Image (cartoon, coloured by chain):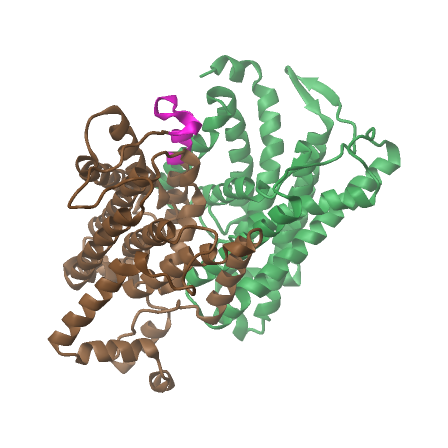
Amino acid sequence: MADKKHKFNLRDHAADFWDASPRWRKVSLSFLFIAICYALPFLNNPLINTPGSDFQSVLFYPVGMYVLMAIGLNIVVGKSGLLDLGYVAFFAIGAYTMAILGTKTSLNFWEILPIGMGFAMLAGVLLGTPTLRLRGDYLAIVTLGFGEIVRIVAVNTDAIGGPRGIAGIPTPPDIFNAKFTILDPKPYYWLLLTFTLLMIWVVRRMAARRPGRAWDAIRQDDDVAQLMGVNTLKYKVWAFVLGAAVAGVGGVIYASQILSIVPDQFNLNVSILILACVVFGGIGNVWGVILGAALLAFTPERIRFLSQPRILVFGVALVVMMNLRPDGVLPKKKREHFDPDWHTIEESGEGEIK
Amino acid sequence: MDFALLRDAFWGLTFDGLALGAIYALISLGYTLVYGVLRLINFAHSEVFMIGTFASLVASGIMGVKVEDDPRTGWKMVLTLLVCLLFSMAASAITAVLVEIVAYRRLRQRGATKLATLISAIGVSISLVELFRIITDSLPREFPRIMDKTFLFSYAGADIRNDKVIVIVAAGVMMFALERFISKSRYGKGIRAVSMDETTATLMGVNINRVITVTFLAGGLMAGAAAFFYILTYENTSFKVGFFLGISAFTAAVLGGIGNLKGALFGGFMLGILETYTSAVFGTAWKAVISFSILVLVLLIKPTGLFGESIQQARV
């Protein structure tokens, strides 16, 4: 442990710098960061440009969408240690809510957004309440099954388009001077970014309060948490539902931009990719997760010039990176002031899914 | 809903289900063995199976069988079948061992978290699928008919086809051999010891790296056999084949209680039969929904699967 402390570590230095900063510096740095994020579509740097696909579209999907979903999944997997392999189901529920209500009723995007979120949360409660009693790998297979069931039901139900899906989903009405059209992905990106920043704020607040402490306790040891009086099932369902809400919002925005959806967009690979984003970036640490999602979503687009083997390169890169940095690119900061007797807990992989 | 079909063709469906279940059981043994020793879902196991099907294809090419040829007969047929089987098993076993070295070994020795290892295995799985997608140009491949498929006899209205009999019998022999290996051999004892307590096993002089390699090897051999039986029955394969079979086999392993050999066997056969019945009643489109629903129900009543999770008392 001691030698680890002396090793130069960019993340810890950045964290120390942040903690030591006066308030004005924190505020101005935050504003600078947010401004850069909003200005990203106008950047035309050959280094980050994506030859072969429109950079502004790439920023919306996959990059922005993966970042939002990874933040949502991080609540479930990273904060509370529940392995969810069917996260795409909530995304699909949001997207289908937008598609069905948008084409069949006169509700507009802003009215459907909370409904889609609500349906996704309801699905989270319905799936979570019975299954969150299960542990680790059993939960993984049940959620995986749920993700597949949602897709199969969508494929086999003719009322919602069957395998052909739903086309002609309306775009959101204009707000401020932003016009939502198929041709211009920028407003969608800004909308998504706004939700993402909102989510980061919500998650950070939650993590600092009672739910956050309960999730920490559950992740480290479910039985001990229960013994100490944490209502584990309640907080697990809460984590699940919050994660579902984020994916639901993502789904609604996605459907309103892409204009037509088919069930096969919502396959297991999406769930696995989002999970890879979370683990690749640094599980539990929201900045790591954002970085991981941005990298994993961006890389396949950046190397599109490789055409055929680009996913192969992606897979190999995943293996190499996990072998080099098993805790992710930007892992969670380890607690620094700890009792020496607690070494074993620190080293037995805190945050590990049991 | 077509319950009449289920009633009329009950024994025929049961028999088909057994043949499918034998393939599931062989694959799920690989999941269960690795889980028992490492406590990890081997996400790349479905690709081990996929490579086995392609190895069978290559072996049939080496033996000079062509898709348009008539099926072979006599000793020539037996020889071709055996060569394909052995080739497929060898290819899968080598792949499984390589997967362990590439995706698992370094992470395990560094004491990485389970999730990091999972993602590493997923990376290997993505790479292998993509590799075969590029090699095969995203097209399914047809497997030549090596043996003539005839009905041996009829029982209670069910026609018993010879290739399915071979699959069930041969899968039974494989499973018996694996059970002997786990319960009697030196390495089998090692596998059981490591699955009980890794640290103590190491202290007692068990070479843990070698035991883990043997575990992957055994799982790969079973998956290779399953791959050959699959391609013999269904006569085609594609780069996607591992995905569907893998999910079903993993479901089967969890259904029986993952980490438990008897559970994997029972779960495999049970899932095979269930899927065949539900496809007959509700149509093939819904079979995955039904099998997952049954899995959820079983897990809610028995949270560690039907037989619980332990490889220590491995009895088939």
Q: Colour of chain A?
A: brown
Q: Colour of chain B?
A: green
Q: Is residue B315 magenta?
A: no
- What's the residue at 18%, 46% (across, down)? A177
From the viewer's side, name the closer residue of A326 and B166: A326
* Left or right: where B66 falls relative to A292: right
From the viewer's side, name the closer residue of B11 and A186: A186
Residue B107, image x and y in percent? 49, 68
- What's the residue at 37%, 70% (across, down)? A348
> Which quadrant: the N terminus of chain B?
top left
Residue A216, image x and y in percent? 24, 62
Identify the residue at the far left of this view.
Answer: A23
* Left or right: where B33 falls relative to B290: right
Identify the residue at the far right of this view.
Answer: B75
From the viewer's side, name the closer residue of A142 and A176: A176
What stretch of residues is rendered in magenta?
A150-165
- What's the residue at 41%, 55% (across, down)? A297
Say above or below: B90 vs B10.
Answer: below
Residue A6, image x and y in percent? 35, 87
Image quadrant in which you'd find residue B66: top right
- What's the residue at 77%, 45% (across, down)? B59
* Left or right: where B40 falls relative to B143: left
Say above or below: A56 vs B287.
Answer: below
Residue B14, image x and y in percent? 58, 25
